Amino acid sequence: MDEKRLLHACELVDAGKLAEAYDEFVQLAENTPDPIEKAWPLIYAANTLQTLGQEEAATAQLSAARALIETHRPSNPATNEMFAAAESFLDFEDANLSWLRGDNLEAALNKFDAALTKHRSALKDPRARGLYEAIQIRRAFILADLGRWKESLPVLEEIKSPQEYVEGIAFYLGHCYLAAHDYIKAEQKLTEALSLGGLPLSSPW
């Protein structure tokens, strides 16, 4: 896979040029002969489509990536670093799309839980810390939305240096502390959430 081209496509995403980025991901996939490497730009393409609000098209791209991975599964997946990374990324994006739809939080939670179990070994790698935290952040949000704050709170407290949803983490921590009658911490976190931009879009409150 042309890693420079993949990086360029990701830079287009960061610049908000989503349509251009999507085209680049698709073309990169078409020009990548190795099936496992080909799955990567397809997953990125799905993520870009999801950002554009095209959920059905995003699902189709994820299905195409999964077909490649399943068809070319190695005899010992755990020892194939490229395959393990691609599959964990795919399972995350699949669960994330379910979460963003918001129509079945239990189903999305089950997918995130399954990803944690399935990729337990791979997620212990320090290089996978970002993916591990991304899964845990979403799990915590869903648990809180389902009223399971006792399960959500320790997960949120584990996230020390979040790269995303910083205001959401503060907000949900505040409500978990409120439910736990820890009013001092609740006020601190809710005030922090407001200073960071207010309530997360996914919040039911």
Image (tube, rainbow, N blue to C red):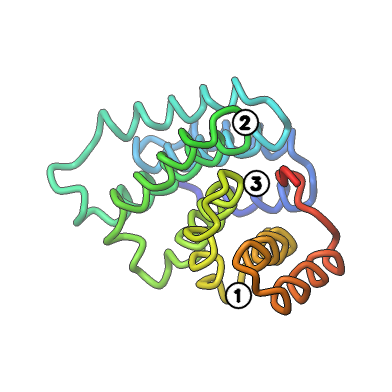
Give, as a three-letter code, the residue at label 2.
Answer: Arg
* Image position, residue 161 (x, y; %): 60, 75
Viewer-proximal residue among 24 and 136 = 136
Other-residue count near label 2 (Cα within 10 Å), few / some / many at <14 / 14–19 / ≥20: few
Residue 34 image-quadrant placement: top left
Marking on residue 101: 2
Q: Amino acid at mark 3?
A: Ala
Question: 10 Å neighbourhood of mark 3: few (<14), some, or many (≥20)?
Answer: many
Q: Nearer the viewer, mark 1 or mark 3?
A: 1
Instruction: Say which amino acid is labelled 1.
Output: Ser
- Looking at the image, tell me whether mark 1 or mark 3 is earlier in sequence order: 3
Measure how far apart labels 1 and 3 are at the Cα level: 26 Å
Residue, disc 1: 161
- SS at badge 3: helix
Instruction: Tell me if residue 126 comes above or below residue 54 in the rendering.
Output: below
Of 53 and 95, the residue lying toward us: 95
Residue at left offset 26%, top offset 28%: 71
Residue 31 location in percent, x, y? 48, 34
Quadrant housing residue 78: bottom left
Q: Residues within 10 Å of mark 1 (few under 14, many from 20)?
A: few
Q: Residue at point 42% right, 64% down?
A: 128
Using the image, tell me which numbered label, if any, was put on residue 9. 3
**C-alpha distance separating marks 1 and 2:** 26 Å
Image-based side of 54 in relation to 69, left or right? right
Question: Residue sitting at 57 percent across and 31 percent down?
Answer: 26
